[in-house]
Amino acid sequence: MSSPFTGLIAAPFTAFDARGAVNRAAIVEQAAVLRESNVRGAFVCGTTGEGLSLTTAERQTVAEEWVRVAGDKLKVIVHAGHASVAEAANLTAHAAAIGAAAVAVTAPFYFRPGSVTELATFLAEVAAAAPKLPFYYYDIPSTTGVNLPAADVLRRAAKVIPNLAGVKFSNPDLLTLQECVQLDGGRFDVLFGVDEYLLAAVSLGATGAVGSTYNYAAPVYHRMLAALREGDLEAACRHQYGSAQLVRALIDFGGLRAGKAIMKMLGVDCGPVRSPLRPMTDDEEVALYERLRPLDIFARPLRRP
């Protein structure tokens, strides 16, 4: 079973209000930016969405609101990963009930599976909660600590998950990426999740991508992909380097908190990050703005904090 997710899919931030509660109203504006940027979908409650810092009820609220505002132009993939197989199954069943286009699940990250078979068994228990919904394994070893080869996971999981659609591959291992793309004659959908390597991934056969920077910098990736289609590798590399400069700034300023600061500079206030992450200070936001201001890559003009 495959799912036709191609092009750029943003991983939205979860917006919080001044009290730290989920800010449903902000999702309307977040979705508007994605539509302006010709992004194909939204991967909600994942790493960028601080999904594991939300309660189950909050995750359901965020997913419901994204499905409501997405309309026909955006497809919503819900991340349902959890350390508890029962909670992951509940979130998966909820995603199906609200009309999500697909669901993705990480490996459990506290008591970790020690083998491909153990992981496939966990994923199968979760996927069974929504047997008609396209199901993706979300491979992100940097946060789960589970570094089992994704191609091996797909091979084993395909035997026990009839609705297995593919893998969200948030992993810089381009050798394994190729194995996933070529597995069983291209049977599986491979959604690449490392924005700064997208040019390499597309060149190796990935046709869809999920990333945080597509929330606010999708234009540079569209230019990169267009240049690649036209055979202008030099221009494609130049655009990918613009992405690399952005990602380097995000790393230097603290990842998620810096990303939320950029959204605010675009006029979409997603609020602070949740503890244990630390919000940006005013001085840090100004410094980040000055760092990014020379880059011609954003969906809207940046506003100075």
Image: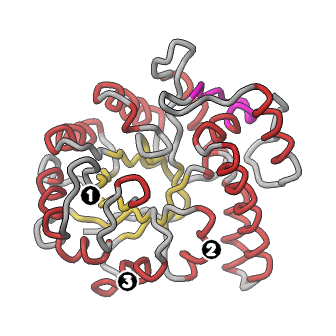
| Left/right of residue 68 with respect to residue 39 in the rendered view | left
Colouring rule applied to residues = secondary structure
53 or 59: nearer the viewer: 53
Look at mark 2 in the image and give the residue it sits on. Answer: 199
Q: Main secondary structure of the magenta part?
A: loop
What residue is disc 3 on?
A: 179
Q: Residue at x 59, y 35 (%)?
A: 30
Query: Residue visible at 37% across and 83% down?
Result: 179
Mark 1, secondary structure of its residue: strand
Q: SS class of the residue under badge 3?
A: helix
Location of the N terminus by quadrant is bottom left
Looking at the picture, which amino acid does disc 2 mark?
Answer: Leu
Q: 270 left or right of 105?
A: right
Which image quadrant for residue 236?
bottom right
* Residues at marks 1 and 3 touching, judged by CB atoms closer than 8 Å: no
> Which residue matches tag 1?
135
The picture places residue 239, in percent across and down from the top left corner, at 76, 67
The residue located at (66%, 71%) in the rendering is: 225
Q: CA distance from mark 2 to mark 3?
A: 17 Å
Residue in front for this viewpoint, 257 or 74: 257
Which numbered mark, 1 or 2, is in the foreground of this view? Answer: 2
